[in-house]
């Protein structure tokens, strides 16, 4: 039985989101708005099938995937760069590698106590987000 990430989660901290956005080439005006946001994540997990909806007052992003199956990701409304993404389990962590124009791009989700953690990586930047159950 894998870990269950299902639930509605609210962002409570967002370390170095600025550096991550700069690495993705997000323009100044968009970054200014984006870093004020407190996004919510709704995760629906059925075993290895995931539906991850990140919502905010500015933009939404929906990602659906199955662990172990590579897919095309369009990052629409984020940096809009296409990449090939693959999510795998590393013990109880969900690890995504996003292969494309940007080096070292990907993310990792895990649960720690009652918190949901997300590490977002791009080039030499790491953004650390923590979410609490809504
Ligand atoms: C969708 C809410 C954030 C909107 C920010 C708007 C503009 C900034 C543009 C690019 C910044 C890059 C990423 C934004 C950070 C979070 C959005 C989802 C990150 C992500 O890929 O989460 C994964 C893992 O939960 C599922 O897609």
Image: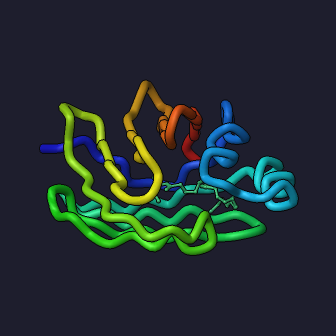
The residue located at (87%, 59%) in the rendering is 29
The residue located at (55%, 44%) in the rendering is 133
Colouring method of the image: rainbow
Q: Nearer the viewer, residue 134 or 59?
A: 59
Q: Position of residue 54 (x, y in %)?
A: 56, 62
Q: In this rendering, would 19 be left or right of 125?
A: right
Q: Nearer the viewer, residue 102 or 38?
A: 102
In this view, 102 is above or below 123 = below
Q: Position of residue 32 (x, y in %)?
A: 86, 52
In this view, 104 is above or below 43 = above
Q: Nearer the viewer, residue 62 or 125?
A: 125
Q: In this rendering, would 126 be left or right of 65?
A: right
Q: Position of residue 39 (x, y in %)?
A: 67, 55
Q: Nearer the viewer, residue 87 or 113?
A: 87
Q: Position of residue 12 (x, y in %)?
A: 68, 37
The residue lying furthest to the top in this view is 113
Q: Quadrant of ligand 1?
A: bottom right
The residue located at (55%, 69%) in the rendering is 61
Count of all numbered marks drawn on residues in the image: 0
The picture quadrant where one finds residue 27 is bottom right
The residue located at (20%, 57%) in the rendering is 67
Image quadrant where one finds the N terminus: top left
């Amino acid at each position: 039985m894998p870990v269950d990430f299902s639930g509605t989660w609210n962002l409570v901290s967002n370390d170095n989101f600025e550096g991550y956005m700069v690495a993705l080439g997000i323009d100044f005006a968009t970054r200014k708005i984006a870093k004020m946001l407190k996004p919510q994540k709704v995760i629906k997990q059925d075993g290895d099938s995931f539906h991850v909806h990140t919502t905010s007052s500015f933009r939404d992003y929906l990602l659906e995937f199955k662990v172990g199956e590579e897919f095309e990701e369009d990052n629409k409304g984020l940096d809009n760069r296409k990449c090939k993404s693959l999510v795998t389990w590393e013990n109880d962590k969900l690890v995504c590698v996003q292969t494309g124009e940007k080096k070292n791009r990907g993310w990792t989700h895990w649960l720690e106590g009652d918190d949901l953690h997300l590490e977002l990586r791009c080039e030499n930047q790491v953004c650390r987000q923590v979410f609490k159950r809504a």
